[in-house]
Image (cartoon, rainbow, N blue to C red):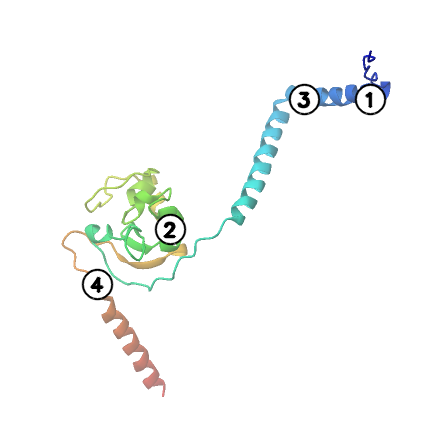
Amino acid sequence: MAEPSVSPAPSSSDSSENLQEESFISSFIAEVVKSPLNIFLVIVIAILVYKIFRSKTQEDLPVQEHKELPKIRKDFTVEELKKYDGRGTDGRILVAVNGSVYDVTRGSRFYGPDGPYAAFGGRDASRGLATFSVVPGKDEYDDLSDLNTTEMNSILEWEEQFKERYDYVGKLLKPGEAPTNYSDEEDEGSQQESDVKSKED
């Protein structure tokens, strides 16, 4: 007949280590819960750790390369602007802010069809930026005359950011307004430069 196996009794040193570990964890949790400041700090630390690990995993993802599109210089009506929402064959995205049109193609992850601000692609984003609303704007020209001073100041701040980050393309035309012929301006500019050089000689 086989003798029943008896498991060895835990040694007193093992049980004291387990007890110390449990008491350390419980005292740590009790200390954190005592103060709202400690709870806040634990939350902040958890968020920071999450962001650090998240950013490292995002760095591993392949970066989408955007082909460099030729610069354009042209004025647009609201209807013409709609064609440049990132869904065209070249993927160009134009956004109007305060009457100026900018090429935001390099920001396609924001303004492209799948971006968080896709509603602004191929449209006048002024009202949405002023009112912090990410919904498609009006389908006709918006003169923004009903916006208050704070909202207009917000548009001006956004316009400065667009000027710094993106290429200026042209104006958003009011109904009946004639577009500027930019090729004439460039020709005049080069003609003026050659006139200045000839005067210097």
Return the residue at label 2.
108
Return the residue at label 3.
29
Q: Earlier in the sequence, mark 2 or mark 1?
A: 1
Q: Earlier in the sequence, mark 2 or mark 4?
A: 2
Given residues 109 and 16, the one toward you in this image is 16
Find residue 58 and report its horizontal and vertical position in percent.
52, 46
Q: Quadrant of residue 49?
A: top right
The CA span between labels 4 and 3 is 69 Å
Residue that protrudes farthest toward the right in the picture: 12
Under mark 3, the amino acid is: Ile
The CA span between labels 2 and 4 is 27 Å
Q: Residue at x 30, y 76 (%)?
A: 190
**Which label was assigned to residue 168?**
none
Given residues 109 and 194, the one toward you in this image is 109
Return the residue at label 4.
180
Secondary structure, mark 4, is loop
Q: Earlier in the sequence, mark 3 or mark 2?
A: 3
The CA span between labels 3 and 2 is 46 Å
Q: Which callout, 1 or 3, points to the residue nearer the camera?
A: 1
Q: Which callout, 4 or 3, points to the residue nearer the camera?
A: 3
Secondary structure, mark 1, is helix
The CA span between labels 1 and 3 is 23 Å
Find residue 171 and report its horizontal and vertical position in percent.
25, 56
- How busy is the neighbourhood of tag 3: few (under 14 within 10 Å), some, or many (20 plus)? few
Under mark 1, the amino acid is: Asp
Cβ–Cβ under 8 Å for marks 2 and 4: no
Return the residue at label 1.
14
- How busy is the neighbourhood of tag 2: few (under 14 within 10 Å), some, or many (20 plus)? many
Under mark 4, the amino acid is: Thr
Secondary structure, mark 2, is helix
